[in-house]
Image (cartoon, helix red, strand yellow):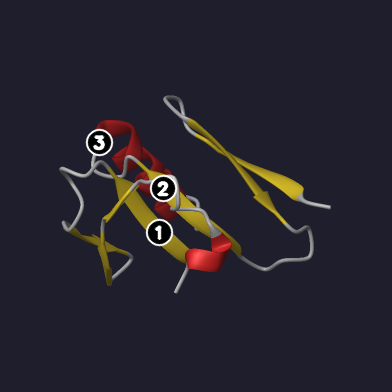
Amino acid sequence: MLGRVRVSSPTIRILLAAPPTCESAELAVVGVTGAVGQESISVLQDRDFPFHPIKMLASKRSAGQSWNFLGQDYVVEELTHDSFDEQKQD
């Protein structure tokens, strides 16, 4: 059974599914290089949302860019049909 956590701001709403006893959620931000993706990152940072790990996903054009979030560098991955396939994860 998954619990639901809602993170919101005046401009966006994020609904995440996480096990209710989990101390952190696995998180992916789709469209991280765009305006809504950046607002999502800002809300997560401002609200101190517990997560681990986080995937930064965007279009093929943005893939490979480096983003710093909470002092850690992330490489933006291309969003594909396999982006959420658990068997293909590292």
Q: CA distance from mark 3 to mark 1?
A: 15 Å
Secondary structure type for disc 3: loop
Q: Mark 3 or mark 2, which has the lower sequence index?
A: 2
Callout 3: 10 Å neighbours few (<14), some, many (20+)?
Answer: few
- Say above or below: 10 vs 79: above
Residue that label 2 marks: 29
- Say above or below: 90 vs 86: below
Q: CA distance from mark 3 to mark 2?
A: 10 Å
- Say above or below: 78 vs 21: above
Q: In the rendered structure, are the residues bearing label 2 and label 1 in contact, judged by CB atoms less than 8 Å apart?
A: yes
Residue that label 1 marks: 55
Where is residue 70 shown, x and y percent of the image?
33, 65
Callout 1: 10 Å neighbours few (<14), some, many (20+)?
Answer: some
Residue at 35% over, 46% down: 79
Callout 2: 10 Å neighbours few (<14), some, many (20+)?
Answer: some
Where is residue 86 shown, x and y percent of the image?
56, 63
Residue that label 3 marks: 34
Residue 50 seen in this snapshot = no
Q: CA distance from mark 2 to mark 1?
A: 6 Å
Residue at 48% over, 66% down: 88
Where is residue 25 shown, x and y percent of the image?
60, 61
